[in-house]
Amino acid sequence: MRRVVSLFLPTWPTDRARKADPALPPDVPLVLAGRDGNRRVVLAADHAARAVGLRAGMPVSLAQVMVPDLTLRDANLGGDRQGLERLALWLHRRYAPVTAADPPDGVVLDTTGADHLHGGEAAMLVDMTNRLTRAGFTAKAAIADSWGQAHALARFGTEPVTIAPPGSGPKIVADLPLPALRLPDVTVEGLHALGLRRIGDLLARPRAPLVRRFGQDLARRLDQVLAQADEPIAPIRPNDPLTTERLFAEPIGAAETIARAIGLLVQALCPLLAQRGVGARRLDLVCHRVDRRPQAARVGTGLPVRSARHLERLLCERILTLDPGFGIERMTLTATVTEPLPARQLANALTEDAPPAIADLVDILANRVGDGRLYRAAPITGDVPERVVGRVAPLAPASAASWPVGWPRPPRLLAPPEPVETLALLPDHPPVWFAWRGIRHRIRAADGPERVFGEWWYTADEHASVRDYFRVETEAGERFWLFRAGDGADTATGSQLWFLHGLFG
């Protein structure tokens, strides 16, 4: 099933203007103006301008009367279009093998076979919109079975991120207004004159009389929004890509034949990677079917790779996600993201031990479950135990930080620490017993206290806070890591309550 993402940028021109001129006050309405014949009109308005009633198409003179302190700039339609193409290229490198600008306010992506690298469709859309928001752009996104459906949901849906389940049918778009069909204004006005306001109103009526009155374009847009008609995407391509192509005399469709073609494509691509001294971090395989509906698969690697065997294996695992339809007549393989990979001397098995090679395994797992679900625990410089462990990419280089030495740490930490009932004979003594989750444990031996001070540079509350940790062993042989919040005397150092923070093996 094809899956298409429509990214909607409602204030793209004004967001670009604000990024180009950071001195523009954020709370003052901003409009961009241009010419419509002999008239000077508003072409774009930001959220503040829309809130006071300004809109695209109104005369600039009227806008200045309505808002005397209005910020006015000249529109740059060509720059906005080029900016969308640059954004599409960035999205192509990061998210999907097929992307294109959808002017004047969006980008369309065919993410079929690529969302698994980002933890699924929901995680991919949230990551996409969050990155654009942090960059200063207002963004909404929707994913559906067709470009027309995703386009309508992104622009007229109520949520910032909309996911239409595969095969949603007409129900998902029935309540959307008629402009969601991307029809000319004169057609929408004509339909409004007949009392039709929503897509569901059109679907409830016979199509033939409507087509006879408003033309075939109405039927085409209805089929596209219902995912019943294909709408090809003309993808944007980077300059000078590393790509190989294979044409077939007869359409192919068997998995074994596709795997053989993948092997030939990879063998042709790897010498190109070697010539440039780079390795592939992301590969896009696009299969062009005879019905003009491309099928794409994307794989990624944790490190730069130009091993034909490894790349072929990663791509062949994605064959089951490809639908050959009536046959594939052309296949292209592109190294979308590459990084420098200099030649290196292999380890001599007779004189030295080769480092363990886990990169292949990490790549296989990452392409199955997603990059974000694989990580490695790494030390972080600090004193508070729950802050000295972080997550890094499984193949990330080792950092200079090290684990605390001197006092052992339990392999399992509770997050957050759980309160326990306990009794200690003296403030500096370890507890005699403690009760955790309804079970009372009597302590046979203890070691401590290890005093840990708060990290005042994170919060002011930790300026005087103290924890006293004890490593205890119960009469049943279990070992726990307990701490008292405070020094046992001064309430300014903590609540003086006891917590269980970890379990030893």
Image: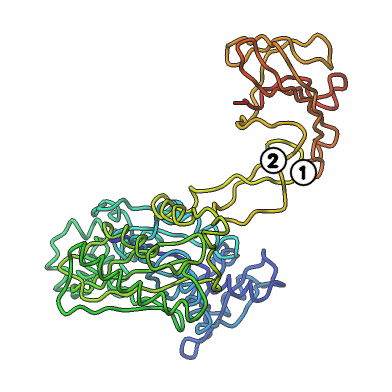
Q: Secondary structure at mark 2?
A: helix
Asked if 24 appears above or below 317 in the picture, the reply is below
Answer whether residue 23 is visible to the viewer in this image: yes
Q: Nearer the viewer, residue 392 or 127?
A: 392
**Colour scheme of this structure image?**
rainbow
Q: Which residue is mark 1?
A: 458
Q: Residue at x 79, y 40 (%)?
A: 455
Dot label at residue 387:
2
Marks 1 & 2, CB-CB < 8 Å contact: yes
Asked whether residue 415 appears in the rendered view, the answer is no
Whole-percent x and y of residue 303?
52, 62
Q: State left or right for residue 199 relative to residue 79.
A: left
Q: Amino acid at mark 2?
A: Arg
Q: Residue furthest bottom?
A: 38
User: Hey, what amino acid is under mark 1?
Assistant: Tyr
Q: Is residue 433 above or below residue 171?
A: above
* Residue 503, above or below 243: above
Disc 1/disc 2 C-alpha distance (Å) = 11 Å
Q: Quadrant of residue 155?
A: bottom left
Near-viewer residue (15 or 493): 493
Which residue sits at x=39%, y=67%?
109
Which numbered disc covers residue 395?
Answer: none
